[in-house]
Amino acid sequence: MPLRLCCNGYKNCDVVMSKLGFRIPSDWKIYKLSDIAEVQTGIAKNASNEFIDPVELPYLRVANVQFGYLDLSQIKTIKIEREKLQKYLLQYGDVLLTEGGDADKLGRGTIWQGELSECLHQNHVFAVRPNPRKVLSKYLGWLTESTLGRKYFQLASKQTTNLASINSTQLKNFVIAIPSIAEQQSIINIISTLENAIALTEKLITAKRRLKQGLMQKLLTGKIRFPEFKNDLWHMQMLSKACQINIGGTPSRQEPNYWANSSKDGFPWVSIRDMSGRFIARTKEYITAEGIRKSNTKSVPKGTTLMSFKLTIGRVAQAGCELYTNEAIAAFFPKDNLVDQDYLYAALPLAVKRVDTDQAVKGITLNKRKLETLLLPILSIREQKKIAQVDKLLDQEISLLEKQLHSLKTQKQGLMQQLLTGKIRVQTP
C-alpha cells in the first residue's frame, strides 16, 4: 500500500514530502521499496561448505557491477546446493545494487538483462526484483542512480572513514514516488533516446581510438610512410641517448607546510590521476615552495611530454603550464633537437609496448634502467612533426566526441531529475 498521496494537485499542493525532498503530482503514489519490489540478498562464499548435490555457476561480485553497466571481463564461479539454486538465480530485469565498501561502491548498479544464461550474485550485491504492475525495471534503475537515490544511500548508509555500506533493511525502506506504468513507459522512451545517443557516441570514441592506435603504430614502425620521406633512413635510439629524463619526487605527507589548497598558495603538482587527457592545465594537488625544497620534485616547463612508469605504465600527457611531478612520472627533454615533443607524445606508448617484461605486463613498475633503454625510432624532425600532426588531429577528433558525450550525459541527468520528480510531465497513451 502507498504510504501517502499528495493531494490538491501539483501546482497548489502544500504537502512537501520530507523523505523525498520535493512535491509530487497528485496522481503519483509514494511507496517504500519493499512494497513494490522484492529485495534479494546474495550468496556468501564459504570455502568450508560441504555439499550433497552441488552445482557450480558464475556469480556477480561487486567488481562486476558498475554504474550503468556490467563489467564481465572476469567472472568467477561458486558452488551451491541445487535445491537452493532458485533462491539466488538472477532474473531478467533485476536491478542490481552494490552494498558498498569504498564510498564510490555504495548503491552502484545496473539492470540484469540475461547476459549469462544462469548466474548468481554474491551477498554484497542486492538483486531488486520489481513488481511489474507497479514499477518498471528501467524506471526503478534510474531512480536509484538519480540525485534522489544517491542522496538516500548516503544518508541511510553506515559510514566510516572512506567507507560506506547499506543493508537490506535500509534498502527496503527507500521511499520513492512513482507515476502510472503508462507514464513510466513514456519517460523511459524519452530518456532511452538520450541513452541511445550516448551509446552511439561511446562506440564512435572507441572506434576512433582504435583507428588512432592502428594508424600510429603503422606510422611509427614505417609500415606507412609519407611520400616525401619514403627514402629517408630511420634508426632506433635508446631513450636516454635522445632525451634527458627527469623524475620527480613527493615531499612528506605529514608536513602540512609542504602542501597548498590552491594555485594561489602553491604550484601545480602532477600525479598519475591528473594524466587523463593530452594536456594538463589543472592538478588536484598543489605543492608549496617549501615542499619543493624538501623533495626531489622537478620543474616541468609548459609543453614538456610526461609519462607514468609506475603502477600505471605508459600513460602520456603534456604540461599545459609549468608543473611539478611526483616520483612515478618522468619528464623528457630532447638532446640536440633530436626529438620533437609532440612526436615524443605519440611515440612513447609504442616504445613501452616493445618492452618484454612481466612487470610492464602486470602494470607494477618500469624501473629507471628499463625506462632509459626504451627504443625510440629516430627520423628527421620534419617527418616527426608530420606524424605528430596526424596524432594531434586524431586526438582533437576524439576530444570533440568526448565533449559531446559529456554534454549528452549532462542532458540525461538533468532530464532525469525533472521527469523522475514530476517537475516535467509527459503525455501518456
Image (cartoon, rainbow, N blue to C red):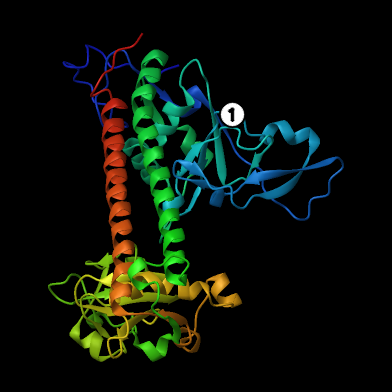
Badge 1: how crowded within 10 Å, few (<14), some, or many (20+)? few
Check disc 1 and report its element: helix, strand or loop. Answer: loop
Q: Can you say whether 42 is above or below 228 in the image?
A: above
Q: Is residue 67 left or right of residue 25?
A: right
* Frontmost residue, 212 versus 252: 212
* Image quadrant in which the N terminus is located: top left
- Image-quadrant location for residue 266: bottom left
Amino acid type assigned to the residue bearing label 1 in the image:
Tyr
Rendered residue at 17%/17% (across/down)? 11
* Frontmost residue, 185 versus 89: 185
Q: Is residue 417 left or right of residue 102?
A: left
Q: Can you say whether 132 is above or below 107 in the image?
A: above
- Image-quadrant location for residue 254: bottom left
| Residue at mark 1 | 92
Q: Is residue 400 left or right of residue 119?
A: left
- Image-quadrant location for residue 258: bottom left
Rendered residue at 26%/35% (across/down)? 414
Q: Residue reaching furthest right?
A: 52
Q: Residue reaching furthest top?
A: 429
Rendered residue at 35%/75% (across/down)? 344
Q: Is residue 425 visible?
A: yes
* Image quadrant in which the C terminus is located: top left
Where residue 231 sits: x, y (%)?
40, 76
Where residue 197 sits: x, y (%)?
36, 35
Rendered residue at 22%/11% (across/down)? 8
Where residue 90 sits: x, y (%)?
63, 34
Where residue 427 sits: x, y (%)?
29, 13
Q: Residue reaching furthest left?
A: 264
